Image (cartoon, rainbow, N blue to C red):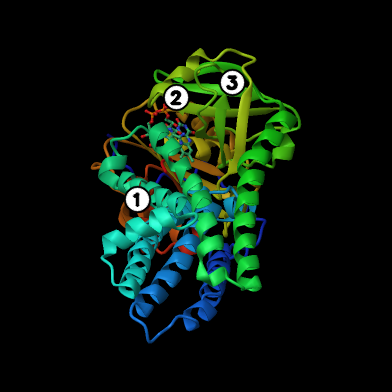
Amino acid sequence: MTTIESRPRTATVAAPQTSRRQPPRRVGDAAALVAGVGAGITVAVTIPAIIALSWSAPGALASALGIVTAMLGTYAALLSILLMARLPFLEHEVGQDRLVAWHRTLGPSTLLLIVAHVVLTTWGYAQQVNATWLSELVSLTFDTAWMLPAMAATLIMVGLGVMSWRRIRNRMRYETWHIAHLYFYLAIALAFGHQIESGSVFFDAPFARAWWIGLYAAVAAAVLVFRFGAPIRQSLRHRLTVRSVDRADHDAVHVHFRGHDLDRLHAAGGQWFSFRFGTRRWWWQGHPYSLSAGPTSTSLRITVRDLGDQSGALLSLRPGTPVFIEGPYGAMRMDTRTTDHVVLVAAGVGITPMRALLDELPPGVLADVIYRVSAEPALLVDELRAIEAASRGQVRVQVLAGTRRQWPMTPDLLTQLVPGIANADVYACGPSGFTDSVHAAARQAGVRADACHHELFEF
Ligand SMILES: Cc1cc2nc3c(=O)[nH]c(=O)nc-3n(C[C@H](O)[C@H](O)[C@H](O)COP(=O)(O)OP(=O)(O)OC[C@H]3O[C@@H](n4cnc5c(N)ncnc54)[C@H](O)[C@@H]3O)c2cc1C
């Protein structure tokens, strides 16, 4: 391990040409506002049904709460689907890692609201007819139209909720978890009939009906268009194939792709695609990989560390293998910077998007690369050194070889490595523990929140 002192730049760099950019638009806040207004309308349409309850009879309060929890729970479920619908605008501005985090935050409340709805509504009816909760549940399920599918939907959601518990999820293969998740769509579809046909909110209420059907239709259309239609169209249009595969080091490979009009993908360094290789074994699995070089109109490149069965199998890909892509995704791009000094901090294979970002460094923008590796020679370090040598001082690369204990990401370390970091944009990529610690250290070192960017290599 070497003791690091901030290395001076090898040559003087011209003063930055570009002025300070405006902070990125507050897309997250705007999305939250729209979602909040939608929740408000969803609660508002329940009011006539709640007023119409016979409040002097037993069970009215439970029934009222049952109605509100049903509507809000389903609204939250539709929202979580929308967050994962690959809406281009949200993917571009917010980034999928944050969208996944929001989706996960919504999950427990959705489940809680749906279960509360089942418990409260059944309890309300049970009080009205003076029956036990369980007998009322059985009678509602089997004697009411559309209730059997709705009950199946609840059971699916509870099952997914249990599977989402971190201890259980960590034991499952990613693919099992992913496929199980698709049942969520089924659950939402199964619940629709009982809402529209049996729900008091929609009885003789044209506005409520239009709002709800419109909401379902919009979410279904978003999923069909952006999760299925757009990637199919894109793959047909660009006809991407594997051009060659070569070793990057002892356990990593570069995969080079060729295709048509790739500039029309509007991909940028720092972004990633989901890649599905057209071989008998792998066609059904999409895996996320970042571009490891700036894209051109005819070629793309990724660099993949062998971390499991699919990543380990890439070396055996044949030239000409067709590739189905989804993307580009990710908000960690050069155009999201707010200053003319970028600090790219990566751990391990998290260096891939940083390497691609360097290909798009505008003139006059300084780049400091901080690369933590367990041992040298590190992945892509020869390319980084070549870029540094050719940059006439615009790019500076510092490699920290050793364990995370030896190189904890602290404000002191970052300031020591990059003295002017408080006025720079900091990009971090790697596993979540790493990006979290870089983010916290950068903030403590004085970096503004809107100048901190990251990409997580795990969902
Ligand atoms: C946005 C993003 C960009 C990435 N870029 C790169 C890169 O440039 N180079 C690189 O080497 N690795 C990258 N990764 C990691 C890479 O996707 C996984 O290492 C790879 O998918 C593992 O698949 P496997 O079948 O080989 O391993 P498995 O043994 O099946 O899985 C190992 C771990 O990888 C994750 N994983 C597996 N499949 C997927 C999937 N389809 N989607 C998301 N995560 C999955 C899971 O956390 C799993 O625990 C990136 C990940 C993300 C989320």
The residue positioned 58% from the left and 47% from the top of the image is 86
Mark 3 and mark 2: span between their CA atoms?
Answer: 14 Å
Residue 209, given in percent of the width and then of the height, sits at 62, 67
State the image coordinates of residue 97 (x, y, percent, origin top left): 47, 49
The quadrant of the rendered image in which ligand 1 is seen is top left
Regarding mark 2 in the picture, which secondary structure is present there?
Answer: helix
Residue picked out by circle 1: 158
Q: Residues within 10 Å of mark 2 (few under 14, many from 20)?
A: some
* Rendered-image quadrant of the C terminus: top left
Visible in this render: residue 306? yes
Viewer-nearest residue: 86 or 22: 86
Indicate which disc residue 311 carries.
Answer: 2
State the residue position of label 3: 278
- The kind of secondary structure element at disc 3 is loop
Amino acid under label 2? Answer: Ser
Total labels: the figure holds 3
Q: Name the mark on residue 187.
A: none
User: Toward the viewer: 359 or 191?
Assistant: 191
Locate residue 430, reporting x and y percent.
40, 41
Q: Amino acid at mark 3?
A: Gly
Q: What whole-number distance in Å separates the C-alpha atoms at marks 1 and 3?
A: 35 Å
Q: Is 207 above or below relative to 145?
A: below
- Image quadrant holding the N terminus, namely top left
